[in-house]
Image (cartoon, rainbow, N blue to C red):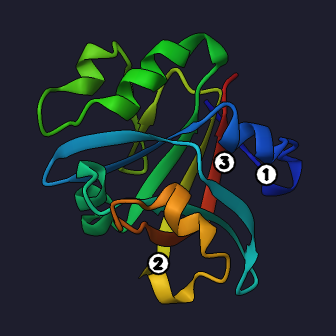
Amino acid sequence: MKEMKHELLNENVFNMIGKDWLLITAEKDGKVNTMTASWGGIGILWNKKVAYIFIRPQRYTKEFIDAADKLSLSVLPNSYRKELTYLGRVSGRDEDKIAKANLNLRKYEGVPYFEEARLTLIGKKLYAQSLEEASFIEKGIIESCYPEKDYHTMYVVEIETILEAE
């Protein structure tokens, strides 16, 4: 992987997040966990280049995100669709899903990411807030996306480094 200047990122973020999916990865107490995500965004907030990620309260990865100052968002090539599906379906509480997915962890300045990624964003957490039912203007979203009332926590992450496959 090599570093890329933020200004050179030329990705369709709608495809990158919604179609290609992300692996959100963090470390806690020497252990790494990851999850697949297809919701989120990239933009500018507080004069910083940021990513927005959303994690449900029951996800094991949330414990790792909450404990870590930094995390990675990795985009794998489409040939890893089977592994991405598996990593989104199975909990790291139950098994070593990273090992079972046959992915190789690497670290960039102490932050875990995947060697197989075509693109990785290394970010520092800036803000976290749980979504609240009362704040939804479009109430149909609650019925369609939150029938269990398990509202996501939104994290705003400053994108410090972008790595791209060589």
Kindly identify the residue that appears in the image at 38 percent across and 19 percent down. Answer: 103
Camera-side mark, 1 or 2: 2
**Which mark is first along the chain, 1 or 3?**
1
Drawn side of residue 139 relative to residue 93, left or right? right
Asked if the residue at tag 1 contacts the one at tag 3, i.e. Cβ–Cβ closer than 8 Å, the answer is yes
Q: Is residue 158 above or below residue 85?
A: below
Among the 4 quarters of the image, the one containing residue 93 = top left
Q: Is residue 5 above or below residue 74?
A: below
Specify the label residue 162 is tagged with: 3
Kindly identify the residue that appears in the image at 49 percent across and 89 percent down. Answer: 134
Among the 4 quarters of the image, the one containing residue 164 = top right
Disc 2 secondary structure class = loop
Q: Amino acid at mark 2?
A: Leu
Quarter placement of the N terminus: top right
**Which mark is first along the chain, 2 or 1?**
1
* Image location (x, y in percent) of residue 24: 45, 46
Q: Amino acid at mark 1?
A: Lys
Residue that badge 1 annotates: 5
Residue that badge 2 annotates: 131
